[in-house]
Structures are given as structure tokens and as C-alpha cells.
Amino acid sequence: MSDTILKFEHVTRKFGSFVALDDVSFDIKRQEIIGLVGPNGAGKTTTLKIIANLLKPHSGRILLKNSEGIFQEAHNVSQEFVEQGFLIDIPDFYNTNSWILLKHLAIIRHYPNHNIEHRVDQLLKFFDLYKWKYVKIKKFSKGMKQKLAFITAILNEPELIVLDEPQTGLDPESRIKIREYMKSFKERGKTVLISSHLLDEIREICDKIIIISKGKIIGFDTIDNLEMRFKTKQIRIDLYHPLKKDHEQEVLTRIEYGIRNLSGMISNGIEEETMLTYDSTDKSMTIYYDGSRENKRDIFKLLSEKFAEELEILEFYEPKRSQLEKLYAQTTGSTQIKSKELK
Amino acid sequence: MIFDHFNKLMKHMDPWLLGLLFKVNSWLKAFIKQVKIDLTQILQVMKFEVQLHKIRFIIITIISIFLMVFSGFLPTILLPFGFISDSPYLFFTMSLSLFSFLAPLFSCLLFSGVICTEYKRNVGFLRLPVLKKHQILIGKFLGNYFLTLILVAIIYTMMTVFSFLFYGPPIVLTPIISFMFLSLFLLAYCSIVTFLSSFMPSALSVIITALALFLFGFGILQSIGQAIFPELEPLYSLMYVFNIVTVSVQPDFMDQERVYVDPETNYHFWSFPTVEGALLTLIIYFLVSITLAYIIFRRRRG
């Protein structure tokens, strides 16, 4: 697609005896939006802080491509050559107003002097903060501060933007605005690395995701490829009637057995995972599979032919959302989402 | 221009030497470029720091002027209980006695948060990846020091004006020497405050510690030092070194007796240091404190 702008090579970082990152390697290409997901303490923020040069790795190296197209180790690259925007740990602000702060940040990031006011106004207007331009930031609400923090990261139109949980706690409208802005960034050839717990947001904007757990990368690919690899693609079946109580368990076991016998469905330890969930109140069934068209067809045939009597199928479809949650839960071993799904 | 001239000369040189010179040349260019970037960034941090502390500085200046006028200048000149100074030099000395407490206090208020506020709820993350820590430290230090110097300059100017009003011409110029010593003293003292700020959790704890150190710490240290080594001049005590600020307004201060020795107990009463001693002590305090502050700031993560 495009060229690599950041290389993370065999990076290990420890805090005392705790290994936050364990021999982590990945490459990020230009014009990609990469999502970094994982449970708390998985090593997401450590990864971002190392890229931001706020932490040094104990081993391995981070190579950044500078404006001359040469890879240099991150801590040796002058900010003059690599344009990066960072938002790490949603910071608090200095006791001043947003205009003075943003102007200062634009200057130290070498943004052209004559354009600063226009740029600041443009961003403040887009994020509905313009009328607060000369108001002290300490009077801002939490959401406003978060939007301002996002503005600080994108102020100088950086080539690489590193964002740590930029949307947590924001209202839906602001989330949409930030999402739209990130998409527009990609269109302008920029690269974004974003960590978030909001999996739907990640699914919405990211080209690829890095799943990280216990300091190791478990998966790094497009969401579709990962879902295929970990067989977490979903098919949802809405039923007209719920299954009869006395046959429910038996029918479900038979269906699951049938699905498992489809080609390629048993691999990568998937047999340990639940492939089928059933919700009697919702009168719906969810089947997890590898996403292949053949298996989708076979599942449909299996249900419509062999279980025609037991199941009165209303709808058979692939939901767009929440598949990432299953993927996340399966790959990181998170029990929270599983139990929520199995309710 | 100079580099171009060298390049012409180098055509006739040994290739090894030529290579070496080219390396030195490119290294120098890179170094000069880095210095320029550093200076620009430091200047921006300075400007921002001054802007941040503008209101605090105005309030401090108003309070200082009020206190100095009504507790320092006017009572010294007007009150009829033997307070009246018979010469402008004595007037300066007495006024500076009050200011000797105010100047460290107010500079402490400005400097207390130099480093620790950068870690207050990660405020520093707004600038840290872009700016280097030495740029932040130097910029913030110079910004606050600039404000401190303006405050001191205002007080000294007022002192000179009051002296002129009450004692008449000629305008006394010795306060300039005192002003220079006080500036240097504040440079050392503020670097100690910056050092404290590099590892302490909050600005308040820095203020309390720095003031306690100035008001009691150095005094206690001096007492202990003199008890053990009575003949050793207590240059290690900033409290003692500060005496040169008040005494240097007198034109003949270099001829004055600096130490009185009790013949019975051999106890040495040191009144003020020599110019060289004061300069050396203050510079050492400044360099050591600011270096330590930078080392700790560089290593500090949260």
C-alpha cells in the first residue's frame, strides 16, 4: 500500500520485575490508522510512550523515518525532522486560556507563524470550543478538556499521530467529530496510532489492529483477517420461536457438533472456545466462524436442512458490530466480555 | 562564508586531513544548528512562563511595593523614635533588611512549581515529547528569574527615588552593586528552589522547605559549623553570604572589619563575606543545584 514510517524492533521494557513489553516488533506504514487494543496493563501506553520518546526501551530499538526518508532511532531524531503529534494520558493544562496555550504549542512545533491564528481558530471552531478561546482552561468541563487535548496533538498537522484513549468520556457528538477528523487525516496521507478500549470506535476507523496482552503482540492485521484467523466472525440467527426447553441443550449440542465438523473450523485451539451462543429471551443464536464464504454457506445449509424442524429461522445475517469484542476476548483471555456475551 | 574559504584551501590538503576537517565542519554546523534550535525553544518557553505568571507577578509586585513603602521606606525616614537614618546608606541598609526576607519569599512563590507542576496530572506531556527537558528547565528558570529581577529592579529603583526625595542629590549609585549581589544571590537561591522542585511532589511543599531552609536551615548549619570550626568563615551558609547584599550599599564596605574575634572564647563573629568569597559561593551553589535539578528532572518519570 505505502511505505513504512515506523519500525518497532524487538522492544522489551521492564518496570522492576514486571515485563511491560516483551520482545515486541511491528511496522507501521504511511496512511494507516492502527488501533492498539488490549486489557489494562497489557503494555499499550508503554508502547506509545516509547514511541513518544517518553520512555526508553531496555532492549530493541524504534526506528522513525525522518522527512529525508531515512530511518533513525527515535531518540536520535530531531523533532525538526519528524512531525509527530502525541496525546498520552489525557493531560491537565497550564493555567492559561486555550489561545495562549495552542499558540505556544504551535510555535514550539514550528508551525508557520502567519498561519497559527487561522489554524487555532479553525480547530476550535470544528470542536465547538471557539467561544471559549479566551476563557481559562481550568473552567472547561472534562469533555472540553479532552477535545482540547486532541487539538494539541493534531495542531501542527503531524505526519504521525499517537493517541492514547482520545475518546474516553466524550459525548457521542464529540466522538463522531474526532472519528471524522481521524478519517480525514488518513485521506491527507497521515498515519495514526491509537489505543482505545472503545472497540466499536476502533472497528469504525482502524485499518489494522494490534492486539496486545501481557506485553506481547497476539495479533497484528486487518480486523477481517484477524477475525478469520481467530474464527470470531459472527452469524446471527433470529428465530421466530425460542427453542423448546426440553430439547434446547440437545439441539444446541448437535448444531455445535455440526459446525465444528465443517472444513477448517477446528484449528488454532478454537475447539476450546464457545462457537455457539443462544439467548432464549432474545430468541437469537450467534455462531462464531472463520468468515469464509464456503463455511457461511455450509452453516446456512446445515441449519436450514438438518434443523428445519427445530429452528424457525427469521433472519440469518452477519452483524457488523461487536465481533471485535469476541476477538478481543478470545485473544486476550478477557473474561469480562465473554461473561457479558453469554448472559 | 568562513566555511567556503576553508573549503577552497582544503583542495590542496592531505585527503585524510581533508576528511577530518569535513567531519569537524559538518559537526560544527550541526552543533550551531542545534544551539539555534535550543535557543529558539528556550525563548518560547521563557515567554510562555512569563505569560503564565503575569498575574501572580503583578500581585507580588503590588504587595512588595506596599510592604516596602509602608513598612520599610516611610518608617525608616519619618518615624521619630531613632529610626531616622542619618544617611542614605543607612536608609538603604535598613530597607534592604526587610527586603532580604521578601525577595526570597517572592522568588520562592515564582519558582516553587518550576519542575513539579510539569508532573501535576501529566501537564508536561503537552510539551515533553516536542521539547527536550533541558529546554523546559532553562526556559522556565530564565522566565521566572527574569520576573524576579524585574521585581528586584522595581524595589531598588523605588529605594533610590525615595532616597533622592528625602536626602536630596546626588543620586547614590552604590545600590547598583548591591543589586548585582542580590541578583546573584537570587540566582543561587532560586536554583536551590528549582532543585527542591525537581523531586518534591507539590509547589507548596517546595515553598515551605525552601523558606525553612533560608530562615532556619542555613542559620542552624552556620551555628553548628562555627561551633566545630570557629575560625572557618561560614561561606557554606547562604544566610551569611546574603549579608553582602545589605552591606555593599555602603561605599567603604570593603574596608570594614569582617570578623570580630572574642579574645576570651576565641569565638569568631563573621559579619559579611569578601566579594570573591560571595561570588564563588553563589556560583557554586547555582551550578551544583541547577545541575542536580536537571539530572533529577531528566530521570523523573511521574
Image (cartoon, coloured by chain):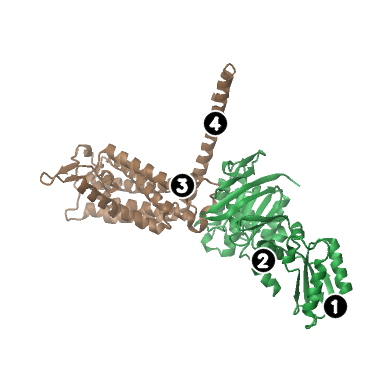
Chain colours: A green, B brown
Q: Which of marks 2 and 1 is in front?
A: 1
Name the disc covering residue A312, or none. Answer: 1
Residue at image position (16%, 43%) is: B260
Q: Which of marks 2 and 4 is in front?
A: 4
Q: Which chain carries label 3?
A: B
Instruction: Classify A11 as above or below A90.
Output: above
Element carrying mark 2:
helix
Labels 3, 2: one chain: no
Tell which of B236 and A6 is nearer to you. A6
Amino acid at pointer 1: Glu
Where residue B290 appears, as percent x and y from the top left, is 40, 45
Name the disc covering residue B137, or none. Answer: 3
Q: Which chain carries label 4?
A: B
Instruction: Classify B124 as above or below A241.
Output: above
Where residue B263 appears, as percent x and y from the top left, is 11, 44
Mark pair 3, 4: CA separation: 25 Å
Tell which of B247 and B294 is nearer to you. B294
